[in-house]
Amino acid sequence: MKNILVLCTGNSCRSQMMQGYLQQMVGDKTKIYSAGIETHGVNPRAIKIMKEDGVDISHHTSNHIDEYHRVDFDIVITVCDHAKEHCPWFPSNALRLHQSFEDPAGTQGTEEEIMDKFRQVRDEIRDYAREFVTKYLA
């Protein structure tokens, strides 16, 4: 069984969404973790827009990367530039992949504009997750 880590800055939106999609797409064949180099709690808007797309991340927790220092990861995916630049070194031969997604939590505007940005980023993450599964886990 492969261990995959999805890493972003605060483990509140992007990494949580990616973890949710990957778990849905691969089921029990792979263990998917998500973490941040900080912890900001799971964003309620991320939970809401994922539920709209049939993925429940309401049970997820915001975890710090240090919690997983003993896990031997096969693949580490960074989903923001800040995490890529500050990603700790793991004593493993993990394949490192990077795809930066805009942080929807930083969006300003009306609630509708903010939710539209969350949906846009969610859809980009879903598309990347599909491509990832096809390329690395099929």
Image: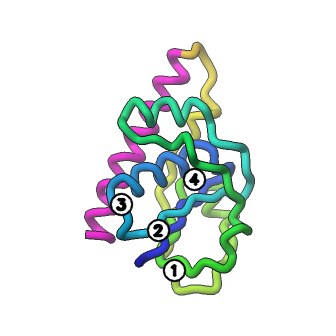
> Label 4 to label 2, Cα distance in Å?
21 Å
Q: Give residue 23's mark.
A: none
Query: SS at mark 1?
Result: loop
In this image, 125 relative to 96: left or right? left
Please provide percent x and percent y for residue 88.
69, 72
Instruction: Residue 44: give x, y in percent of width and height.
Output: 60, 32
Q: Which residue is mark 2?
A: 31
**Residue 30 painted magenta:** no
Residue identified by numbered label 3: 27
Q: Main secondary structure of the magenta part?
A: helix
Labelled pair 2, 1 in contact (Cβ < 8 Å): no
53 or 116: which is nearer to us?
53
Left or right of residue 100: residue 132: left
Residue 133 at x, y = what percent? 31, 62
Mark 3, Cα crowd under 10 Å, few <14 / some 14-19 / many 20+, is few
Which residue is labeled 1 in the image?
A: 94
Please report contact status of discs 3 and 1: CB closer than 8 Å, yes or no.
no
